[in-house]
Amino acid sequence: MPLVFVGPVLILQGTFLFTPLVNTFVLAFTDASTVGGGSFIGLDNFTALANDGDFWAAVGRTFAYLAVTVPVIVVLSTSLAILVNTSLRGSSVVRVLLFSPMVMPLATIAVMFQFVLDSDGLINEVLTGLQLIAEPVPFLSSSDLALFSLMLVTIWKGCALSTLITLAALQNVSEELDEAASLDGAGWLRRTWSVTLPQIRGTTILVGVLVSIAVLRVFAEPYIITGGGPGTSTETIVLYLFQKGVSPGTQAGYASAISLVLFVFVLAAAAVSWSLTRRSRT
Amino acid sequence: MVRRTVISGPLAVASALALAGCGLSDGSAPSGEQVDTSGEVTGTITFQTLQLSPTFDDYIEGVIADFEQQYPGTTVTWNDIPSDSAARKTNADAVANSLPDVMDLDTATLAPLARKDLVVDMNTAAADVKDDFVDTAWQSLTFGQASAALPWYLNTPILMKNSELLSEAGLAGEPDPAGYAELVEVSAKIAAATGKAGFQPTEIGLPCYLLSLGVPLVNDDGTKAVVNTPEAVAFIESLAELHRSGGIPADTVSAQQRGEIETFQEGKTAYLETGGSRLKIIEENAPAVYQQITLGKPLGVADEGTWLVTHGIAVPKASENLPTAVAFAKFLTSSANQLALAKQSSVFPSTTAALDDAFFQAKPTDLVTEARSIAADSLTDGTTIVRPASADAEFAAALWSAVQPAILGEVPAERALAEAERKLTTILEAR
């Protein structure tokens, strides 16, 4: 009987989720192009990948992205969630502002930030107007700054959902414990640090892992705003994959091998999540 | 639990094998084989164009009706798709073995099909009409020894100038820059005098500039990149100098740069080398700038190297009705049909007979007719050059990405070009 309910979903999942996945796995061991064909070449794609300096540079950039954005998003979203959860005047306005990035498509956000960060964009106009700078800051056209500019976009977008998840966890924090700590003479900061935060530790870890997985797959920001440039300074793993296998490249087999390696990275992030969640429960 | 494992194991293996077959499916005619395109012209074929509907509905439907009338028993089913989804749809169709019988494709989308030998070689299938076409148009669709498509409509640039900006820079009445090296010099003067840029270099344009300057881009058989030459180094160094002085827009090198047409219609650049069809866009978006436009010959003319954009009509080898598909491709690209299309659009025909028509030599009355006359001249006087087929969109993207740090002044031009050559050769070797 349960199969009657689960069966159609399984068929749909099998067709549209697992078939492409297995197909990708198969293609990774071929020299297929995006227009078809390809023959079995064993581990050649993976050997080539191991020696592909451009790929490892993209991996390095993605992990640098991860190292900066994940802690910032976690700290910022936790702080914002606590702020929004506190009955302060004007917190309802903050709540609306905070969640607006969630309802905006990533492509729209990326285009918006492109105009904000251009050399004649909003930030440079304001800074020049205030006579704080003499020359426009090359947010997007400097190899040193471009990746950080993209991180800013990811942080802006990523905070909304993370804050929402953390806020949901804060609603379940025991008020009794907070009151008890208050009676013991603990101030707001002390109560937040020693009572509230430990109670939402599991959620904070979950947010961290979800953001890590999202950042490992970051694509829209570099694709739309900088196209991976200047040079290759903002080329992430997924953008490299896209360039090799989708457009304008035609190395479907090689791109599939890249996606499998990325899959392993994401799987590792999920494993860390599972392990940390288990530890926080025990 | 044991039983479940026993069942799911073989099931998984069977599924994997089935999917493996799916992943490796080819669906094309055997590589390198000549296909027989002779036979009776009859039956049904499908024809796919890129974003010509609804503007050219009457024209396309008229050509199809004429063909069906000339070859009784034939039916052509027309399908128009958006240009930006052409590559994805074509790739998916190739894998699924469901390519249309006759396809209108740009060279970038055609390239992978040609490299994999999935399309009919027009050198043999259309040998009887080969001489009708402009040679550079024919050559630009030639991949290796095979010609992957019949040339259809063409475009070639003209030079648009913002006369007000040039006046402001004290260059009113001065002759147009002769070639890209001179464009760089003039742009520096414009920047010094007005604070505005001369022109905006682009990813698509860069291979054309280099080709015009005598950089071969690839070796004779297209297996190795050749971009690190003294001419290329000098040009990239001059772009870096221009970037410093403001002669090109500051955001030129953010890879997803603002389109060069946008910066021109915002009055931020003095020159724009582009197809005449863009005049209409500028007129709609920036009427004030449109009023200031004057036209000149394309820059490549000076070095006998004006670029050419060709759309081709290709027939997949896997078509089930090759005789009719090839016959329709020839019919569509005939001089009469091409001329009719050119007369109601801003594109150019690819046959010499159609280009000789008085329509292209008529005295200019406005910017559009002037642009047509200038472009037609460069198509017929032999100054268009063939961009090597291997220097395609992927090549242009990798080259542009590699030289960006040099334009920014972050690395020496020679090192950037050596790196570009290494990367591009790797790409070419992987094909």
Image (tube, rainbow, N blue to C red):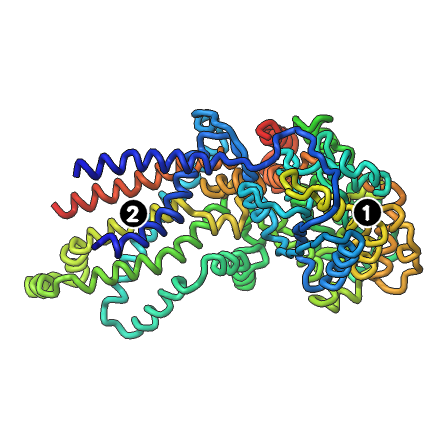
Q: Which residue is mark 2?
A: A209
Q: Amino acid at mark 1?
A: Ser
Can residue A77 be seen in the rendering of this structure? Answer: yes
Quote the CA–CA distance across marks 1 and 2.
Answer: 57 Å
> In which quadrant will I find the N terminus of chain A?
bottom left
The residue lying toward the viewer, choosing from B352 and B123, is B123
Percent coordinates x, y for residue A82 in the rendering: 24, 62
Q: In this rendering, would B107 be left or right of A87?
A: right
Q: Are marks 1 and 2 in contact (CB under 8 Å)?
A: no
Labels 1, 2: one chain = no
Helix, strand or loop for disc 1 = loop
Which residue position is annotated with label 1?
Answer: B350
Q: Is residue B121 left or right of residue A269?
A: right
**Which residue is drawn at the image coordinates 76% and 51% (left, top)?**
B273
Given the image, what chain letter belongs to the residue carrying mark 2? A
Q: Residue at 84% of width from left, 51% of height from top?
A: B375
Residue B245 visible at all = no
Q: Residue at x 36, y 65 (%)?
A: A99
Screen quadrant of the C terminus of chain A: top left
Relative to residue B351, is residue A160 depicted above or below? below
Amino acid at pointer 2: Val
Q: Position of residue A72 (x, y in %)?
A: 34, 51
Tell us which disc is closer to us: 1 or 2. Answer: 1
Badge 1: residue crowd in 10 Å (few <14, some 14–19, many ≥20) = many
Q: Position of residue B338 (x, y in %)?
A: 81, 53
Where does residue A171 sit, x and y in percent of width and height?
20, 64
